[in-house]
Image: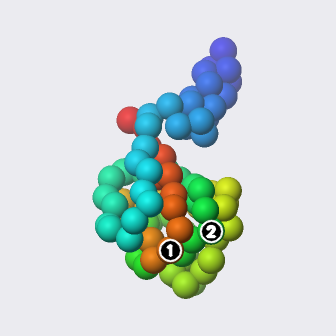
C-alpha cells in the first residue's frame, strides 16, 4: 500500500492541491513553489531556485503551457503570465 500512497502524493502535487499564485505582471513573486507553468509565452527577469544547475533560466522564452519543475522561492517575469504551484508540506 505504500506504493499507492506515493502515487497519490505525486498526483496531489502535480494537480496543484496545495494551491499557488497567478501572476500577470512583472512584480516579484515569493513563496515556496514546486513548479511554474506559463499560461502565455513569457520570460523570467529573475529566478531563485536550488534544483537546477547549468545556464540561467533568464532570457529564455517559454511557450504557453510549458512547466518549469524546480524548487523556486522567488521569481519575476519580464513578459508573460504564469501560475506558481505551491510545494507541499
Find numbered disc 2 in the image and state the secondary structure of the residue it sits on. Answer: strand
Q: Which mark is residue 22?
A: none
Residue wearing tag 1: 79
- Tell me which corner region of the image, top left, top right, bottom left or bottom right, holds residue 76: bottom left
Identity of the residue drawn at 59% across and 56% down = 39
Q: Does residue 30 appear to the left or right of 33 in the view shown?
A: left
Q: Quadrant of the N terminus?
A: top right
Q: Dot 1 surroundings within 10 Å: few (below 14), some, or many (20 or more)?
A: some
Q: Quadrant of the C terminus?
A: top left
Identity of the residue drawn at 62% across and 77% down = 61
Question: Measured along the vertical axis of the image, is residue 23 above or below residue 59?
Answer: above
Question: Measured along the vertical axis of the image, is residue 43 above or below residue 11?
Answer: below
Q: Which mark is residue 41?
A: 2
Identity of the residue drawn at 31% across and 58% down = 30
- Tell me which corner region of the image, top left, top right, bottom left or bottom right, holds residue 53: bottom right
Q: Dot 2 surroundings within 10 Å: few (below 14), some, or many (20 or more)?
A: some
Question: Measured along the vertical axis of the image, is residue 41 above or below residue 16?
Answer: below
Between residue 47 and residue 89, name the one nearer to us. Answer: 47
Between residue 15 and residue 80, name the one nearer to us. Answer: 80
Q: Earlier in the sequence, mark 2 or mark 1?
A: 2
Tell me if residue 10 can be seen: yes
Residue 49 locus on image (x, y percent)? 43, 66
Tell me if residue 86 can be seen: no
Residue 70 locus on image (x, y percent)? 52, 59
Q: Are marks 2 and 1 in contact (CB under 8 Å)?
A: yes
Identity of the residue drawn at 60% across and 39% down = 14
Amino acid at each position: 500500500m505504500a506504493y499507492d500512497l506515493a502515487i497519490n502524493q505525486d498526483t496531489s502535487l502535480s494537480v496543484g492541491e496545495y494551491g499557488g499564485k497567478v501572476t500577470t505582471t512583472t512584480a516579484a513573486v515569493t513563496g515556496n513553489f514546486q513548479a511554474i507553468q506559463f499560461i502565455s509565452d513569457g520570460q523570467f527577469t529573475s529566478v531563485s531556485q536550488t534544483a537546477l544547475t547549468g545556464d540561467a533560466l533568464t532570457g529564455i522564452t517559454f511557450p504557453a503551457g510549458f512547466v518549469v519543475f524546480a524548487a523556486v522561492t522567488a521569481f519575476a517575469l519580464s513578459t508573460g503570465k504564469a501560475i506558481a504551484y505551491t510545494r507541499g508540506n
